[in-house]
Image (cartoon, rainbow, N blue to C red):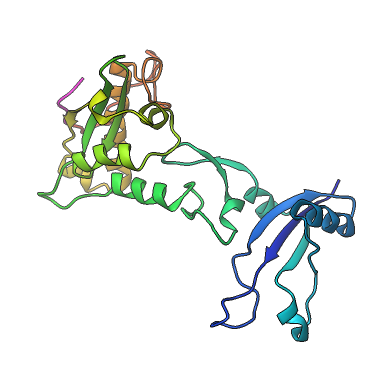
């Protein structure tokens, strides 16, 4: 059955004019045998009859405008908007189409929200020489002994704060939600030294080195099967996790 992309547009702020605003108020898709049936489904879903066309003389009397477009089989761009993706920072599932609304969470195509995008950028920020070095840290539940391993280029106390006061919907953040901070122990496992020759290769190699050290500690602590991490290498048969050129102070 054909699928239709719909956009319910609202008006610009009166100070701007009476044009239809972008992004729309609501965006989604429906399955229907034809455009008329698709419109009926949208009207039913929102409990309102939306016009498909509004003349200039009728702008004052119409609050919304409905736009409908059939999604063709070869319209890969539109279809990708509805694919379930995983946030690169918090691993929450999301769809890019969620960003095509008036109250968009932002974050671009790789993150579920602008908050995750900013936190991720901060984690991988290459600090100037003399600033805080990248560290691998561990946050442990005192009662259960279960831990979470993370990495940061921020001042590590800031990352500690962010976990408790800007949580997402990860396995770890669900565990700390509603618990007092004194139930948890924060410690630095390793200060990651980035050799000059690695820095010269650029951000990709620097990130690879830091991620390699994080993965090594996740494996050492078994923090996926017996902790709060949700991704990483845990099989004993995996290749060496430490990139060439790394100078380490941990496992």
Residue 80 x/y as whole percent:
64, 49
Point out the residue furthest to the left here: 130
66 to 173, vertically: above or below:
below
Q: Is residue 32 left or right of residue 210?
A: right
**Chief secondary structure of the magenta portion:** loop
Quadrant of the snapshot with the N terminus = top right
Q: Is residue 132 left or right of residue 55?
A: left
Q: Residue visible at 23% across and 31% down?
A: 136
Query: Who is closer to the viewer here, 148 or 240?
Result: 148
Residue 45 x/y as whole percent:
77, 51
Please indicate, yes or no, whether residue 126 appears anywhere in the rendered image. Answer: yes
- For residue 144: magenta? no
Q: Residue visible at 36% across and 21% down?
A: 239
235 to 49, vertically: above or below:
above
Quadrant of the snapshot with the C terminus = top left
Q: Is residue 241 left or right of residue 97?
A: left
Query: Who is closer to the viewer here, 191 or 156?
Result: 156
Query: Who is closer to the viewer here, 56 or 193?
Result: 56
Magenta segment boundaries in residue numbering:
247-251
Please indicate, yes or no, whether residue 73 appears anywhere in the rendered image. Answer: no
């Amino acid at each position: 059955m054909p699928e239709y992309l719909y956009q319910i547009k609202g008006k610009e702020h009166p100070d701007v004019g009476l044009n239809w605003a972008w992004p729309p108020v609501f965006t989604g898709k429906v399955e229907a045998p034809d455009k008329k049936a698709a419109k009926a489904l949208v009207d039913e879903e929102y409990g309102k009859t939306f016009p498909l066309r509004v003349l200039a003389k009728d702008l004052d009397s119409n609050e919304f405008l409905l736009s409908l477009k059939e999604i063709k089989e070869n319209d890969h761009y539109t279809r990708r908007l509805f694919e379930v993706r995983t946030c690169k920072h918090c691993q929450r599932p999301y769809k890019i189409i969620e960003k095509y609304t008036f109250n968009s969470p932002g974050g671009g195509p790789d993150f579920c929200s602008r908050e995750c995008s900013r936190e991720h950028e901060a984690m991988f920020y290459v600090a100037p020489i003399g600033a805080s070095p990248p560290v691998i840290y561990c946050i442990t539940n005192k009662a259960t002994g279960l831990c979470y391993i993370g990495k940061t280029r921020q001042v590590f106390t800031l990352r500690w704060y962010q976990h408790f006061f800007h949580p997402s919907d990860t396995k770890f953040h669900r565990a700390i939600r509603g618990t007092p901070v004194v139930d948890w122990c924060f410690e630095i496992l390793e200060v990651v030294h980035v050799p000059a020759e690695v820095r010269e290769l650029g951000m990709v190699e620097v990130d690879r080195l830091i991620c390699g050290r994080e993965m090594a500690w996740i494996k050492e602590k078994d923090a996926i099967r017996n902790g709060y991490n949700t991704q990483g290498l845990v099989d004993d048969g995996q290749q060496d996790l430490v990139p060439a050129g790394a100078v380490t102070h941990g496992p």
